Image: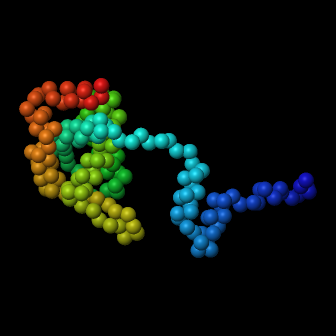
């Protein structure tokens, strides 16, 4: 029983997370412990593994974007954080493939991420490490056009589409059927 004017002890007992945070002030902060704690206490949705059919769909989405709208891309010459680039290219791929329906369009996030990762890797977007950590990326127009032209010439999916005018409709129809 709690006497008048006194709070129950349970109110003042710190939780495990509070104890970890309190330990941070004393220099005992361990990020691995915090992540392990959070992973045991968060409810997470299981992410499906990428199947070969899904990978083929994403490859076709990227090829479709590279074959068409990517060659006309113009970007403001400033630095962008990676997360913003992901959102930009998710939207660009989504708009490009919208005519193939929602089953294709729902994979725009994965396709946009794969596209921007490839462009950063090939130097079409320069990377600058931030003064306080993190990295920023800047569009390199000339290098981007070179990479896009090379991909248009070398990608077998794009070559098949050049040979058959109905290729994209058939390919996307088969991949989401």
Residue 17 in the image, given as x and y percentages of width and height? 63, 59
Residue 84 in the image, given as x and y percentages of width and height? 35, 51
The residue lying toward the viewer, choosing from 8 and 5, is 8
Q: Is residue 66 at least partly visible in the picture? A: yes
The image quarter in which residue 128 lies: bottom left
Q: Residue furthest front?
A: 52
The residue lying toward the viewer, choosing from 127 and 55, is 55
Position of 145 relative to 92 (above/below): below
Q: Residue furthest bottom?
A: 27
Q: On the picture, is 62 further left or further right than 133?
A: left
Which colour style is shown? rainbow
Query: What residue is drawn where x is 88% and y is 58%?
Result: 5
Q: Is residue 77 at least partly visible in the picture? A: no
The image quarter in which residue 141 lies: bottom left
Query: What residue is drawn where x is 48% and y is 42%?
Result: 46
Residue 48 in the image, given as x and y percentages of width and height? 41, 40
Quadrant location of the C terminus? top left
Query: What residue is drawn where x is 62% and y is 74%?
Result: 26
All told, the count of numbered labels is: 0
């Amino acid at each position: 029983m709690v006497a008048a004017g006194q709070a129950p002890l349970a109110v003042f007992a710190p939780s495990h997370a509070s104890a970890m945070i309190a330990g941070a002030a004393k220099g005992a902060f361990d990020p691995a412990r915090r992540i392990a704690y959070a992973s045991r206490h968060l409810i997470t949705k299981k992410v499906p593994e990428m199947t070969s059919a899904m990978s083929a769909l994403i490859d076709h989405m990227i090829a479709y974007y590279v074959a068409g709208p990517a060659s006309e891309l113009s970007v403001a010459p400033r630095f962008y954080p990676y997360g913003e680039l992901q959102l930009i290219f998710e939207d660009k791929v989504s708009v490009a493939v919208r005519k193939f329906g929602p089953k294709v369009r729902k994979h725009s996030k994965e396709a946009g991420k794969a596209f921007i990762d490839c462009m950063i890797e090939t130097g079409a977007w320069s990377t600058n490490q931030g003064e306080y950590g993190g990295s920023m990326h800047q569009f390199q127009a000339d290098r981007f056009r070179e990479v896009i032209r090379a991909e248009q010439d070398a990608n077998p999916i794009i070559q098949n589409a050049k040979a058959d005018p109905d290729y994209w409709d058939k390919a996307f129809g088969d991949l989401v059927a």
